[in-house]
Image (spheres, helix red, strand yellow):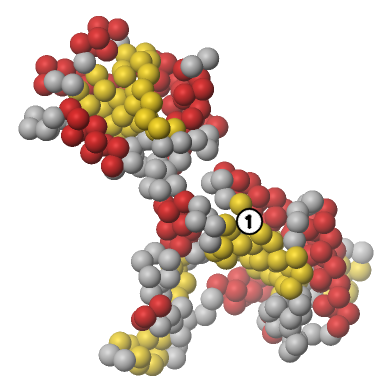
Amino acid sequence: MIKFKLGQKDFSLKPMNCPGHCLMYKHLGKIHSSQLPIRWADFGALHRNEASGALLGLSRLRRFQQDDAHIFCTPDQVESEVTNCLKMAEEIYGQFDFKFNIALSLRPQKYLGDDELWDRAEDSLRKALVNSKLDFEEQKFDGAFYGPKIDLTIKDCHQRLQQCATIQLDFQLPQRFDLTYRHQSDTSCLERPVIIHRAIFGSIERFIAMLAEHTSGRWPFWMSPLQAKVIPVHDKFISYATKIHERLVREGFMADCELDPHSTLSKKVQSAEFTRYNFILVVGRGEEETESVNVRFNVEKEARQHSVSVDRLVELFKEFERKKVKNAEKELLLTLTV
């Protein structure tokens, strides 16, 4: 391992995951075409020597995690594998309500490999995009030196473009590591696989930062750490509030209970809204008598409240999680006003 000093700190060079996955492939021994594609994903720590002035919260780090995947396949499988990657990106970004642009980056002015191989690779990516019925633009000379790529750029709530997903073809690593597979029809014939580098989230930390901004801190209910907060209107109803809280926790929800005796009801509600709880459950005499809660939430920056039975609320919460509803607050409003 090569070590060096940068300023007052000691650093060492560490490879990306790609060489390790190539060694894993080589360790498998004789690979037949029928065994391909082989897909490996790695969420291990990655490092980048960012300038100290460029470091920014979770958005730009020297140590980060990435959904780093490598697909070893035959040239004929490239189109279908890339199509699957695009479907995965559509599903994931759609779940978080992100819009995205697509660019097909073609061979740079300096590249490795022959023109015929590049033509075939670029055509495979182009066909995958066309068959997926996705709009894209072609960018000449913007590909990596080892192969063409597809870049997906997310548009956040401020209309800023953030580069996240990338799908890259690589012909060079299989040559450098002497990776081969035997063709099913002629086992004496050794051929080179193609490697597809795939990352959908990109840096997990940066994606989390983007999502936090995109949602203004109020996370989608199905993944929120602050799904609900129970608030009694008076100390006399602490027992009932605790009962509701324990029921929600027992059902598997991320719920809290506000029991501060020195704070007013309005301050408790205001604090819960500021903390970005998805739902605020206020309980008093009427709710205790009817086994219900007064649920408060925001839809399009407008405060709403409805009375609903505890059983019905738990049922709806489970449905929101199971279906991974994008906007549980809006869905609850539609359900309760029908």
> Picture coordinates of residue 249 (x, y %)?
31, 29
In depth, the one of 36 and 239 nearer the eye is 239
Outermost residue on the right side: it is 185
> Picture coordinates of residue 40 (x, y %)?
62, 61
Q: Mark 1 falls on what kind of element? A: strand
> Picture coordinates of residue 175 (x, y %)?
74, 82
Q: Is residue 235 left or right of residue 5?
A: left
| On-image quarter of the N terminus | bottom left
Number of marks in picture: 1
Instruction: Name the residue at 20% across, 11% down.
Output: 285
In depth, the one of 331 and 85 nearer the eye is 331
Q: Quadrant of residue 102?
A: bottom right
Instruction: Name the residue at 61% across, 52% down.
Output: 99
Q: Quadrant of residue 323?
A: top right
Q: In this orientation, does residue 172 appear?
A: no
Instruction: Name the residue at 56% across, 45% down.
Output: 97
